[in-house]
């Protein structure tokens, strides 16, 4: 069964949902997860050039990062996108608040975010995930599998969380900034 899963993952190239693997193998998803753990251990050996990447309820075969330099010598080098401070702020809001509308992002950032959202969609880091059941039916945005791959996490649950102390520090900084703006007027 491991060989069949390996063949499927290799052939598909992109991530494959665990439920689809279970359906193809005609086994329970629990069995697929057990097989995947065995595969993952085998791929983590030093003499292997690929690894098994888990992405929420899906998995994918990919090149180990330490062999990337060799790979780009023969394959076309992928585009590297520059994530500016504005893009990172917007991406952070989407990652932690998803699903989120543009208006909600703008309320948090305090400025328009059309350009940033459009760039992040273009880069494949966020995507439209639905519409809010409210007047105008605004689009909802969430992160993509490419986001998970890019930041080396298997789900958004693995993203770092701020401590209560950090949150309090940010609140104090924000209040100081507001007071400074008021004093300048």
Image (cartoon, helix red, strand yellow):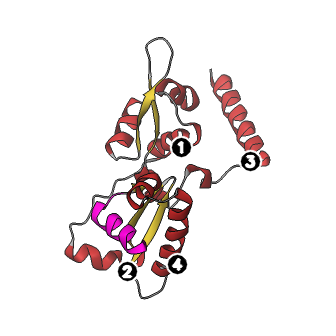
- Which callout, 2 or 1, points at the residue further toward the start of the chain? 2
| Drawn side of residue 57 relative to residue 118, left or right | right
**Magenta-drawn segment:** 1-14
List the residue tagged with mark 4.
41
Circle 2 SS class? loop
Circle 3 SS class? helix
Q: Residue at x 45, y 69 (%)?
A: 52
Q: Residue at x 39, y 67 (%)?
A: 5
List the residue tagged with mark 1.
95
Q: Position of residue 178 (x, y in %)?
A: 67, 28
List the residue tagged with mark 3.
166
- Which callout, 4 or 2, points at the residue further toward the start of the chain? 4
The residues bearing labels 2 and 3 have C-alpha atoms spaced at a distance of 40 Å
How dense is the environment of label 2, judged by Cα within 10 Å: few (below 14), some, or many (20 and up)? some
| Drawn side of residue 117 relative to residue 74, left or right | right
| Drawn side of residue 153 relative to residue 184, left or right | left
Label 2 with label 3: CB-CB less than 8 Å: no
List the residue tagged with mark 2.
49
- Mark closer to the observer (1, 4): 4
- Which callout, 2 or 3, points at the residue further toward the start of the chain? 2
């Amino acid at each position: 069964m491991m060989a069949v899963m390996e063949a499927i993952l290799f052939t598909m190239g992109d991530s494959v949902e665990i439920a689809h693997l279970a359906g193809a193998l005609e086994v329970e998803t629990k069995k697929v997860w057990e097989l995947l753990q065995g595969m993952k251990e085998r791929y983590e050996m030093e003499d292997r050039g690929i690894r098994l990447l888990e992405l929420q309820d899906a998995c994918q075969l990919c090149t180990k990062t330490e062999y990337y330099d060799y790979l780009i010598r023969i394959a076309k080098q992928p585009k590297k996108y520059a994530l500016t401070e504005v893009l990172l702020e917007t991406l952070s809001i989407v990652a932690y608040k998803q699903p989120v509308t543009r208006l909600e992002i703008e309320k948090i950032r305090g400025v328009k975010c059309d350009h940033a959202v459009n760039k992040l969609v273009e880069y494949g880091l966020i995507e439209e995930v639905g519409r809010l059941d409210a007047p105008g039916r605004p689009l909802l945005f969430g992160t993509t599998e490419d986001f998970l791959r890019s930041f080396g996490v298997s789900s958004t649950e693995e993203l770092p969380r701020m401590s209560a102390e950090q949150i309090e520090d940010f609140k104090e900084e924000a209040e100081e900034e507001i007071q400074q703006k008021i004093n300048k007027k």
